[in-house]
Image (cartoon, rainbow, N blue to C red):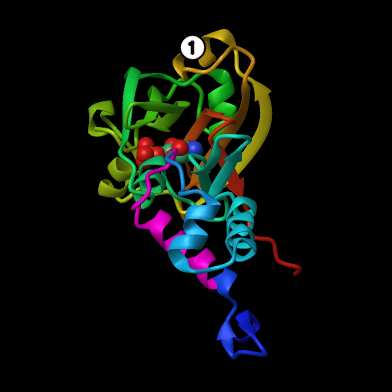
Amino acid sequence: RRLCRDPASHQPLAYLRLRSAIRNVIEQRDIEPGHALPSERDLARALALSRVTVRKAIAGLVEEGMLTQRHGAGTFVAERIIKPMSRLTSFTEDLRARGLNPRSEFFERGIGEVTPEESMAMNLSPGVAVVRLHRVRYAGEEPLAIERSVVPANLLPDPSLVDDSLYEALEKRGCRPRRALQRLRAVLLSAQHARLLHVPTNSAGLAIERRSFLDDGRVVEFTSSWYRGDIYDFVAELHTD
Ligand code: GLP
């Protein structure tokens, strides 16, 4: 807090105050993602602040990724989704935390025999039964990702237990993952994936593979996902030790 105070006035710096006020407005969704902020001049006039102060506050929020600027068009509330990488959360939880409406459209929600690749990745005996989910994940009407998940059937015996959220279904069975390994890779989205995600073929995407574990080390899920690169930011906090 002390760092944010102007030593001369003993007041928080005006641009920092404005920055956190705008951040609050965005977090309360008083201005929706994708919508424009009032112009610099209108803000300055309405708040009786200098344009330099307003510009500085906005520049800080652009740097944080909360606002985006389009030349000639103005400043908009960013539509990107910032996903902290260090917490093991589900798609549903991430979206709900942002006030968005998560939903899935399933291509496949069934049970079958594990493939050799899956049995190696999941440390399962050949031939055991697994539940397979293949779905497009949406925020409202907006497709964000495609996911293929495999879960051992001894942990989740019936695919129809997954209404929309896999983690909710696992939680109900006492099998919520406790730890996960996740790999992110930059990809160009194939024509098929791009079509499902409503973006042009060869758009930037993130291929994410997650293997999640129970406390006893058993693999709960093996999920391959393709996220839209134009919407998702994966952010990790780094420590020195
Ligand atoms: C994220 C992860 C997946 C995980 C999913 C669960 O999208 N990348 O590995 O399976 O969350 O989300 P939900 O519980 O909404 O189905």
Please identify the quarter of the rendering in which residue 182 is found.
top right
Query: Which range of residues does the magenta coloring cover?
Result: 17-34
Query: x and y percent of residue 219 in the render?
Result: 49, 41
Ligand 1, image quadrant it occupies: top left
Residue 133, x across and y down, in percent: 38, 24
Residue 67 sits inside the magenta stretch: no
Count numbered badges in the picture. Answer: 1
For the point 52% across and 61% down, the residue is 44
Look at the image and tell me in which quarter the C terminus lies. bottom right
User: Could you tell me which secondary element the residue under label 1 belongs to?
Assistant: helix
Q: Is residue 152 above or below residue 37?
A: above
Kindly identify the residue that appears in the image at 34 percent across and 37 percent down: 166
Q: Which residue is mark 1?
A: 195
* Residue 130 visible to the viewer: no
Q: Residue at x 52, y 72 (%)?
A: 17
Looking at the rendering, which quadrant does residue 69 occupy?
top right
| Residue 80 visible in image | yes
